[in-house]
Amino acid sequence: MMSRSQEWSGDDPQADSGFAAEIAGLRTALRGYVLSILPHHAACDDVVQEVSLFLWERRHERDPGTNLKAWAFKVAWFKAMAWRRDRQRERTVNFSEDSLHEIAAAAEALSEEAGERLAALRACLSKLSPQELQLLKMKYVDGGSLTGRARELSQKASRVQKTISRLRLALRHCIETKLSLG
Amino acid sequence: MSKAPSPELRKLIDQLLAEGGLGRVETSRLEELLKDRDALRYYTGVMSQEAMMAEALDGIEAAAPRTIRFPLKPLALAAAACVVFGLGFFSGKQRFSPVDLKAAKQPVVQVTGLMGVEWEKDAAPALVSGAVVAERVALRSGLVELTYASGVRVTLEGPADYSVASPTAGNLANGKLVAYVPPGAEGFTVDYAKGKVVDLGTEFAMDVSADGRTELGVFDGEVELHLPGDKPRPLFQSQAVLHDVNAEDELRAIPLDRDKFVRRMPARDFRWSLTSMEPQQIEFDVSHLIWRPSRYRAIFKWIEGKDAISVSDVELRLDGKTVVTDRHEGATGNLAKVTDNIYRLDLDPSQFLRGRWTLHVSVKPYPRAAAITGPVQSQGILQFEEGLATKATEKDFIGRWGYHFLGSRYIREFHADGRVTLTKDGAPYEEAFVDSRWSMDEGVLKVWIPEHNAFENHVLRDENTLIFTSNPYDNAAKLPEE
């Protein structure tokens, strides 16, 4: 990204870095939105990356009056739909477009609280046991196949999946409790 | 705060986020559920949470060093250099503990179940005389259950040809197989002519046809399909593929056919209950117990309740058509009431076909003594046996037989001089079998019990299994001589 921007004359490095920070600030909300309509981690990563790049490349076209977030979500919607079209033949979840509009609207509304949710999730994670954190890091940070990890732990893949499911529910409950109290 | 998600919604979302994703049916079900506002809010909440996990975890340190709470894999049984099949006739009660230290003395693979097996000519392991060395089981019909020392359980349905390759692997030349791989035994591998299936902790099924087509399905968990020159392909719960090297698409996704495979050795006993004075017909599906022409026996056992039952007109039907019958009237109840409760159903080769076999029985309560009042309520089991040892001799019965009843361990001993003695939880049970004597009558051991003025009858399923035909007890197992 940077090397490309340096080729362009007339860039304002300061404005650019401000814009980059704005995009970065949207990432959390954007990821939640995209994952809701494209429930596949790898696809979500790709689309969010594409959206960031798209916004960056068109930063000069931005109307200062437009809401960057609304713009980003709109771009994300079309990128996600394009991804979905291109991968139609692969085995991915395929909600109808009507449902996706409903889901997108709900996800967009929820994204207003992305910041609070992230803070709540952090607080909730800090209460987990080291083993539980280790497992979650394997899944969400180190990436790769959970099955392979299960093998490393001499543990049955379905049991790892159950643990993940249990933690997911517990964290969800913890977040909701924090938000409703806060 | 929104209400708690339904288990179904939660499960679908978990599955959606797992490596396998959702199938078409589950997707439309989830779509339907999401029409509910609370469900939709739950869904987007989980998705936003999922999406921020990596970011949230960044910087949160697990204080403790890497600790693994999970059980260690059982020790490799390196000492067992060859594959040994133990004596085969275990009932379903056999337990094999992979962590038991005594396991080191066990053979690598044991035959833990046999049903209706017709062996291929050159491939019958000599199962009748203790442990023998064998590497291959090939059967024309029936079911064989093998249990590896690691706890892996392989159920084969004939015609099938399976070889044990190592303590953690096998080779299926053809036939149907279901493998159950318990935690700790992941990595169990089954080779077939065109590929290899590596289990990652699960239950899966294979059907290798003679024409080279192989079906692979996953009941639970995950397996990897390894094909030559291809990266391993993971296959998840409820997924199935057809591998056909001669087809245009060598690998095709197909629906998992759950009914096609036998996942466990079927039980031989069926529960019945009687709650009315009216005569009634009871039907039992015995398809999984009839694999070949043979001498089948239906034994009616009473377990509990104040009414004895009268049994008659026992018919064995194939796809609804009566094939063989035993119409005699018998009765089962507490000891004094049991008469002629074994029904003979001999299927000769001309009468045998694979199909849906059902047993039809007419039952009614036994005429009541005046002292018995209140509603009819009795229950028991039908034991469906094949090829009972009708030629059993005194020698086969003499010795110690162990069984459990209501949590206690009983051992009966039939002595050569005709006496019977009993111990309960290790202590002599002197009140039982006072002045009792046993005798043989056409393969049936009859114990005269003066106190009840009645006979107890016992038959042998095989040399190690005694069936109490007139008592509500589970089968007894032959114990070694002291």
Image: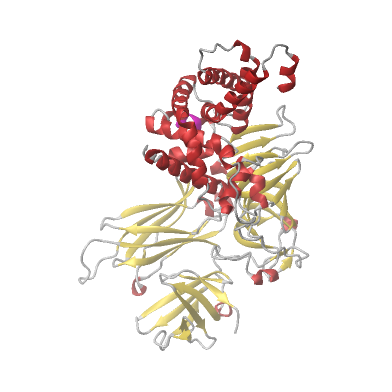
Is residue A151 located in the magenta-colored stretch of the structure? no
* Residue B336, quarter of the rendered image: bottom left
Please provide percent x and percent y for residue A128.
52, 50
Task: Decide: is B133 above or below B140.
Answer: below
- Residue, x 51% and y 40% (percent of image)? B14
Please provide percent x and percent y for residue B164.
73, 56
- Residue, x 50% and y 50% (percent of image)? A127
- Residue, x 49% and y 32% (percent of image)? A114
- Which SS does the magenta portion mostly show? helix
Is residue B29 located in the magenta-colored stretch of the structure? yes
Please provide percent x and percent y for residue B2.
37, 37
Judging depth in this view, the residue of B85 and B234 nearest the camera is B234
- Residue, x 67% and y 67% (percent of image)? B86
- Please indicate, yes or no, whether residue A87 appears anywhere in the rendered image: no
The residue segment tinted magenta is B26-30
Task: Decide: is B368 above or below A40.
Answer: below
Judging depth in this view, the residue of B42 and B290 nearest the camera is B42
Q: Answer with left or right where residue A171 lies relative to residue B449.
A: right
Which quadrant is the N terminus of chain A positioned in?
top right
Task: Decide: is B255 above or below A52.
Answer: below
How many numbered dots are placed on residues in this image? Answer: 0
Which quadrant is the C terminus of chain A positioned in?
top left
Judging depth in this view, the residue of B39 and B187 nearest the camera is B39
